[in-house]
Amino acid sequence: MSRLVGIILVNYQDYAVRFLKPCRDSLHAQTYPVDQRRIYIVDNGTTAESAQYLKDNYPEAIILSRADGNYTAANNCGFNQAIADGCKYLVSVNMDTVAEKTWLQELVAALDNNPTAGVAQSKILLWPRDETEREKPRVNSLGNVIHFLGFGFTSSYGEPDREVKGYPEIRGYASGCSFIIRAEAWQKIGGYDEEYYMYHDDLALSLKARLAGYKIILAPRSIIFHKYEFSRSTRMLYYMERNRYLTLLTFYPTYLFILVGLPAVIMDLGMLAYSIFNRWFLTELKVYSYFCRPGNYVKIQTARQKIKTLSVVPFSQLARDFSGKIEFQEIANPVLKYLVNPFFNLYWQIIKRII
């Protein structure tokens, strides 16, 4: 049985000019019934030129305009409009992607076949850089991992593509690059926390979904290629670092926050030294300044109360699935591999026994 599906894309600055046409063409080619899908493009940080470009190049899409550039708010705007239009399933997909023909059909099937799942992520592969990678694609994400200090990273990054059977549960978080969520689940957990602005927003959304009792699964036959660039992420260091701390303060019970205090301080000192060495010390100070403003703790307390209200699963149960190691090829270095990871992993194994 086909269900009305809302597909939400977010444009920002020159993204549409760079990425929209191949993404659009792959969405046109989907096997899922045309009359059962709606395309929403949120023009985030809109200009007259960007709005006209979207209308000219994707005339059948529903264009929603926002001015402030807040990525999480833009997604909420698109998802809420899709719900208002009667969509039962909601899909988040990056514009810098190209989907295989059965991508959407298999995402829908993942939820249809798994009634206890609230969220399903596609198998996300890296866009091939050459003929060899076209023949043998590499993995971008088979589900994402949460580190106990609030870092998030993809699982199996850079590994050769492989067959994955069934619908394995993702015990970290679903990548915002390509996932589907039930409209009822989205409404229950309140969508994205707009204080995150961008980065770690999908991590926070997934934590809320799991605390509310929804499983997150991988839909391995829903395949999409991602034109991923790590350098694009590193340009947003402020949000990456700030939102890591925001996650700890928003979600962690007080006792767990205290238990991770020692490694958190060690990591913080290391990040401070690293920021000086790599010339983003002012960015790190900006992160600290955010947490020096009392008004932000009012927002954090409000978010904590909302999470407490929706939770039916204890946070300690989720925390046992967190990783003690940061294992991501793009940031691998000897200090991390031989010093930081062994110490933090040992510490976290001890903490998991306590909780």
Image: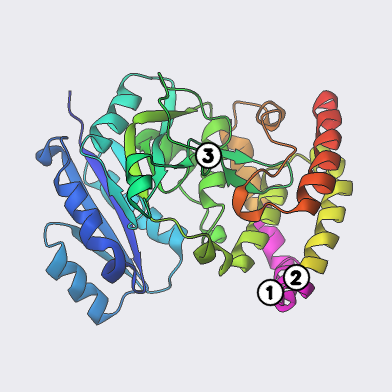
Q: Write the residue at 51% across / 39% down.
A: 159
In space, the residues marked 2 and 1 are separated at their CA atoms by 8 Å
Give coordinates of residue 191: x percent, y percent: 45, 46
Q: Write the residue at 56% across / 60% down.
A: 195
Disc 3 + disc 1, Cβ < 8 Å:
no
Disc 2 + disc 1, Cβ < 8 Å:
yes
Q: Quadrant of residue 280?
A: bottom right
At label 2, which amino acid type do we have? Ser
In space, the residues marked 3 and 1 are separated at their CA atoms by 27 Å
Q: Quadrant of residue 86?
A: top left
Q: Quadrant of residue 167?
A: top left
Q: Label 3's element? A: helix
Q: How many marks?
A: 3
Give coordinates of residue 333: x percent, y percent: 73, 54
Crowd rating for badge 3 (residues with CA inside 10 Å; few <14, some 14–19, many 20+):
many
Between residues 350 and 74, which one lies in front from this camera angle? 350
Name the dominant secondary structure of the magenta segment.
helix
* Quadrant in which the N terminus is drawn: top left
Give coordinates of residue 33: x percent, y percent: 12, 35
Residue 290 lies within the magenta run: yes
Disc ID at residue 305:
none
Q: Write the residue at 32% across / 49% down.
A: 131
Crowd rating for badge 2 (residues with CA inside 10 Å; few <14, some 14–19, many 20+):
some
Q: Label 2's element? A: helix
Disc ID at residue 283:
1
Magenta region, residue range:
276-300
Between residues 191 and 247, which one lies in front from this camera angle? 247
Left or right: 211, with 351 as reference point? left
Give coordinates of residue 56: x percent, y percent: 13, 70
Asked which colour scheme the image uses, the reply is rainbow
